[in-house]
Amino acid sequence: MTGPLLTRRQFGKGLAGLVVAFTLAPELELSAETALPGDLGAAPTLDAWLAIDANGMVTIFTGKVEIGQGALTALAQIAAEELDLPLAQVSMVSGDTSLTPDEGYTSGSQSIEYGGTAIRFACAQARQLLLDKASASLVVPAKLLKAADGAVTAPDGRRLTYGSIAEAGLLQRRATAQVPPKLASGYKIVGRSVQRLDIPAKMTGAPSYVQDMHPAGMVFGRIVRTPPLVPCLRLSMRLL
């Protein structure tokens, strides 16, 4: 025995509603807790993005490259801003496949949107780690410490440089993106006109683009073409 047949419309009315859901981007289903902003997920550890040496110099590693758009200067400004560093204390390592994060290609105005976002959050977290470490050393609450010019200063005047705080392993931890970056209203370096890092090389004719690299052991090749055959054919016809 068979029951009464229902059309899809009748079936929908019987349920009082039907919800259909789909996604065009499955990767967006990641929860807010696991997703990292920008390109930070490409290398989710802090030491993949920056290093601090004993002299307080900070090296920023970026997979983006300079192709005339001034991206490296802007990324250096972002790092200096979040770390409360003079721009002169920031150096950039760009597009080195053995050192820098794999951020894919450099195009479409994405260097700042994705690479800059990653550096901003990584440096904000690093700055908080420096404050927390200084807090433990100076026995002063971190909220009372002031970070400026590559050093942390206590209310009583005691001062620790980033180089003396950043012990080995400090940045060997996962990026969380939980430390909020600075508000735009507090910017002192970002948004200001500074000397671009790529201009001196352009003015002196030094190599400045990715195609100008000469890795060790690099060899050169050229196409050696044979002489045109037409003159030879003409000579043969005259001899005949």
Image (tube, rainbow, N blue to C red):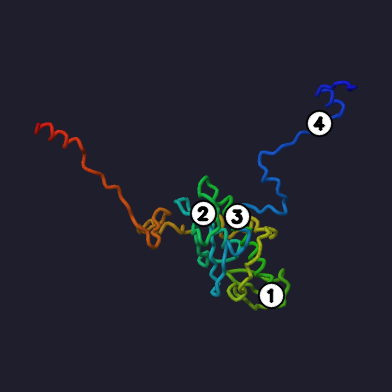
Q: Mark 2 is on which residue type?
A: Lys
Q: Which amino acid type is shown beneath numbered disc 4?
A: Leu
Which residue position holds label 1?
155
- Residue found 67% across the figure and 75% down from its top: 154
Placement of 80 over or under 103, stated as above or below: below
CA separation, marks 4 and 2?
46 Å
Mark 3 residue crowding within 10 angstroms, few (<14) / some (14–19) / many (20+): some
In front: label 3 or label 2: 3
Q: Which residue is mark 3?
A: 42
Q: Quadrant of residue 129?
A: bottom right
Disc 2 designates what residue?
Answer: 64
User: Residue 193 at what x, y percent from top left?
Assistant: 50, 56
Q: Secondary structure at mark 4?
A: loop
* CA–CA distance in space, label 4 to label 1: 63 Å
Q: Are marks 3 and 2 in contact (CB under 8 Å)?
A: no
Tell me whether the residue at label 4 lies in contact with that at label 3, contact meaning CB atoms closer than 8 angstroms.
Answer: no
Q: Earlier in the sequence, mark 4 or mark 2?
A: 4
- Camera-side residue: 213 or 146? 213
What residue is drawn where x is 54% and y is 62%?
60
Q: Which mark is residue 18?
A: 4
